[in-house]
Image (tube, grey):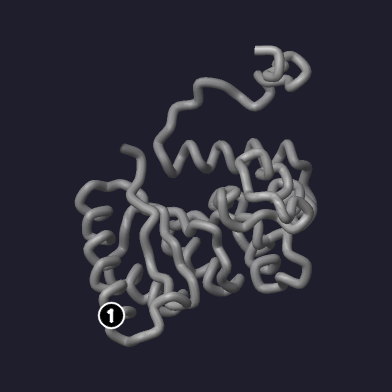
Amino acid sequence: MRAIGECGLDFLRATSSESRAHQVEVFRAQLELARHTGLPLSIHCVKAHGPLVELLRERPTPASVMHAFSGSAEIARELVGAGHYISFAGNLCVQGARRVVEAARAVPDERLLLETDTPDQTPPARRPAANEPAFIVDIAARLAELRGASIEEIATLTLDNGRRVFSVEAPFALHDFDDRDHDVTSE
């Protein structure tokens, strides 16, 4: 086992105070599990960044991943300051998504991750298709553009960060693969 999750808070769906209180109670238990096992969490957060930050202050955990981050640059900096990683998904590719764009620029290289969040958050250029892992290149390209880096630099950086947070040994490097040498259609 490499991580606990996906878990967290979703106050968009939980509209009653009882439902939100229940989510907080369950998330506290998940935070305790992470503390007990030493495993990172994959944390989901929608419309609940303030309460999430408070809970993480109350119960510090091993370095965890803020999955498909949608918060502000200020919240991202606070989470990074507490030792967590920030992962960006298809919402980064949406025109006018200023808040998440500012957050993507604010996260230091050593805490940056990306993901597709398949089957959710299809990048706009791929719609109406359902999201799929191959679309990660869209998110990497957007992140590279925002940070003034190449896609290769973003891929290497985020791969290294993912290996670090999930304690995965490096069996290969990105340059070990050349798409021209691997024709999956003929296999």
Tell me the quadrant of the picture where the N terminus can be found. top left
Tell me the quadrant of the picture where the C terminus can be found. top right
Residue 152: x and y in percent read 73, 36
Q: How many marks?
A: 1
88 or 84, which lies in front?
88
**Horizontally, is 169 left or right of 90 in the view?**
left
Identify the residue at horizontal 25%, vertical 67% (top origin): 26
> In the rendered image, is residue 113 in sight?
no
**Horizontally, is 48 left or right of 23 in the view?**
right
Q: Which residue is mark 1?
A: 21
Give the residue type at disc 1: Ala
Residue 15: x and y in percent read 40, 83
Residue 169: x and y in percent read 44, 27
Identify the residue at horizontal 61%, vertical 71% (top origin): 73
Which residue is most to the bottom?
Answer: 17
Classed neighbour count for the residue bearing mark 1: other residues with Cα under 10 Å, few (<14), some (14–19), many (≥20): few
Identify the residue at horizontal 42%, vertical 71% (top origin): 10
Identify the residue at horizontal 31%, vertical 47% (top origin): 39
> In the rendered image, is residue 88 in sight?
yes
- As drawn, 131 above or below 163: below
Q: Which secondary structure, mark 1?
A: helix
- As drawn, 176 above or below 148: above
Residue 170: x and y in percent read 50, 26
Classify residue 182 by image quadrant. Answer: top right
